[in-house]
Image: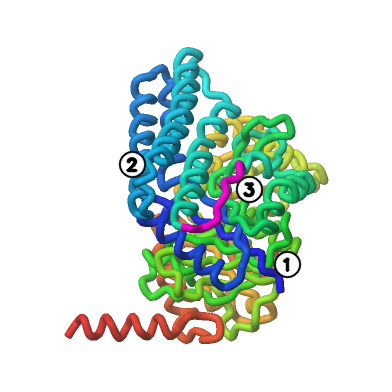
Amino acid sequence: MNRLVVMKFGGTSVEDATAILRTGKIVAGRLSKGLQPVVVVSAMAKVTDLLISAATTAAAGDRAGALAITERLRIRHRDTAAQLAAASGAQGDGAAVAATHAWMDAQFDSLDEILRGLAAVGELTPRISDMVASYGERISSRMIAEAFAQTGLNAVHVDARQCVVTDAQHGKAVPQDAAIELQLRKQVLPHLAEGRLPVMGGFIGATEQGVTTTLGRGGSDFTAALVGGGIDAGAIEIWTDVNGIMTADPRVCPDALRVKTISFEEAAELAYFGAKVLHPATILPAVRKNIPVFVLNSRNPENGGTRITALAPHCRSPFKSIAVKKRLTIMDVVASRMLMSHGYLKAIFDVFDRHKCPVDMVSTSEVSVSLSLDSNEKLPAVAADLSKLADVKYEGRKALVCMVGENIRGQNGIAARVFQTIRHINVRMISQGASEINMSFMIEEDDADEAVRSLHAEFFSDPDPAIFDVEAARQTVQEQGRAGR
């Protein structure tokens, strides 16, 4: 039996002392079952956003405003460390607490020096942005490792930048798998062999020359999968603040159901097309090594969550979940003079490649191409280049509704049911053939919630209990009924 498990805890799972102590108990529970965890943690909730805000504020010349942000963060981290020490009984060890505070102060002092330099230069480069953003995970991971040790866990801090080797593409660096595996053998496996609990930050990495990089927003999930693949873990656990992947956003559909099991392919489609539970790239390292991924709730650790595996069991429902991606733009590229020209599509997509602008959905005819984009800041430059090839127009405030399920394959009449259900909503683009498990369409953003509610009512009225947590939904209905009496 493979006892190695990578446990990733997101920002809300480590947002304060109470959450961190709860996380420690979850880890202790895994240890008590004979498992060997490697813990990956995000920055405390909202910290990365504030760090980026401090950097942009400094680059705009407001040094005092930037330093005020980091001072608030300094106080928050010092207070959290003190609360953790008090909760574990370690407050009596004044030297240890003082050492933690001194280390934190040194980190924030170095951060403040960077911000002063930014204010003087007035330019925020991607490299400096990565350096500033990295402080959240660098500080949280060491603080959490020390908190775990104070509660009796044999925890040790590992700097993720020594393990996650990337290229130099700042802001969204590309991991170097072979180098990562080699570094994990050196930096993590010896700790596991000695019975220690490695704790490392997510999201951050470094080039082979030691320059700090980041994996992009949501990259802590990616870190967990890279570590899991690199050490050939038996499982990867993504601990967040929801019970797992749901059939729809519960804020839109209060009757949404937990999906108990889903395939890698389905989960990847959902992640890319708007499901917030997982980072899209998370799936890839796990798929390569066929490592199951579990999405679990740190506030409700007894819940079974969602299990993501290479092959999911058969589901009698055609769909597993509905995801929505908002704030999209549809771009129409029309050129009658390009009729029958074999280089037309290549010329168009060369433009998107040049601007590093990803495309979500594509629909083509003989002379026109419609595409959906979410990189709105790049639209003017892309449109300017495309206008040399064709007539270009674009419309904003669109939403992409993505319905995912392996049981779409071979089912007659599914498309008819979908579009009959939303016949009161104007559909702008449709895509199904590109993926056998994904039916997607574009609508106005203002219509998205109504479309999801209508589709959920149609396709999840009789859910398969082998796949969906029907019992929990039944209990919720009963509780609401009792509350209404």
Q: Where is mark 2, residue-wise?
A: 79
Where is residue 12, by image quadrant?
A: bottom left
Quote the CA–CA distance across marks 2 and 1.
41 Å
Q: Where residue 9 sits: x, y (%)?
A: 50, 56
- Kind of residue at badge 3: Val
The residue sitting at the top extreme is 120
| Residue at (43% x, 52% y) in the render | 14
Using a 10 Å C-alpha cutoff, classify the residue at mark 3 as few (fewer than 14 neighbours), some (14 to 19) or many (20 or more). Answer: some
- Kind of residue at badge 1: Asn
Q: Where is mark 1, residue-wise?
A: 290
Q: Where is mark 3, residue-wise?
A: 359
Quote the CA–CA distance across marks 3 and 2.
44 Å
Question: Which image quadrant: the N terminus?
Answer: bottom right
Q: Nearer the viewer, mark 3 or mark 2?
A: 2
Of marks 1 and 3, which one's residue comes earlier in the chain?
1
Question: Which image quadrant: the C terminus?
Answer: bottom left
Q: Which residues are magenta?
A: 152-159
